[in-house]
Image (tube, rainbow, N blue to C red):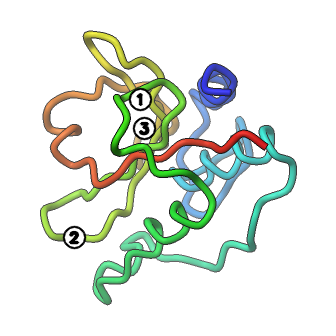
Amino acid sequence: MNTQVVDIARGWVGTPYLHQVSVQGVGCDCLGLLRGIWRVVYGCEPEAIPAYTQDWSEPQGAERLMAAADRHLREATSTPLAPGQVILFRMRQGAVAKHLGVVSDAGELPQFIHAYQGHGVVESWLSAPWRKRIAARFEFIER
């Protein structure tokens, strides 16, 4: 399944960044990318996504993205970094997790695919600044 997840994610590379959208080649944000992968892997999405702001409920301190990942994916924090894992990021220390991506390569120079504002869907190095922001890692569940 991990290879499938990476292949699907790579198919989204080049999709423009559009907040709250999930249409391959047209636009998506980081959650939209994950939603698109989910639809290919499982079919329909597991729950309706309410409207959300770009601050991801940061002012309230609500871990909505983390809670959704807990509901629908399996935590992978105790396993090594691996392709196909979903990584959640805190963009600053003490903030809620509000960005995510999919590990595409866990080798010597790990990479991940994510929808990044101003860049669209890209494959980036999981550099030290990105690694220090990792809040949790999850993986898709075989069904």
Left-right relation of 15 to 62? right
Residue at 37% x, 35% y is 79
3D distance between C-alphas at marks 3 and 2: 23 Å
Q: How many marks?
A: 3
Q: Earlier in the sequence, mark 1 or mark 2?
A: 2
Mark 2 belongs to which amino acid? Ala
Q: CA distance from mark 1 to mark 2?
A: 21 Å
In this view, which residue lies farthest toward the right? Answer: 43
**Residue 131 placement, left or right of 17:** left
Which residue occupies the extreme front position in the image?
78
Residue type, mark 3 in image: His
Q: Residue furthest bottom?
A: 60
Residue 94: assigned label: none
Question: What number is the disc on residue 112?
Answer: 1
| Residue at 53% from the left image edge and 76% from the top image edge | 52
User: At numbered mark 2, what does the secondary structure look like: helix, strand or loop?
Assistant: loop
Q: Are marks 1 and 3 in contact (CB under 8 Å)?
A: no
In front: 101, or 12?
Answer: 101
Residue type marked 1? Phe
Asked if disc 1 and disc 2 are in contact, CB closer than 8 Å, the reply is: no
Categorize mark 3 by other alpha carbons within 10 Å: few (<14), some (14-19), many (20+): few
| Residue 124 point in image, percent of width and height | 36, 26
Residue at the spot of label 2: 95
Name the image quarter holding residue 107.
top left
Q: Secondary structure at mark 1?
A: strand
Q: Quadrant of the N terminus?
A: top right
In which quarter of the view is residue 60 placed?
bottom left
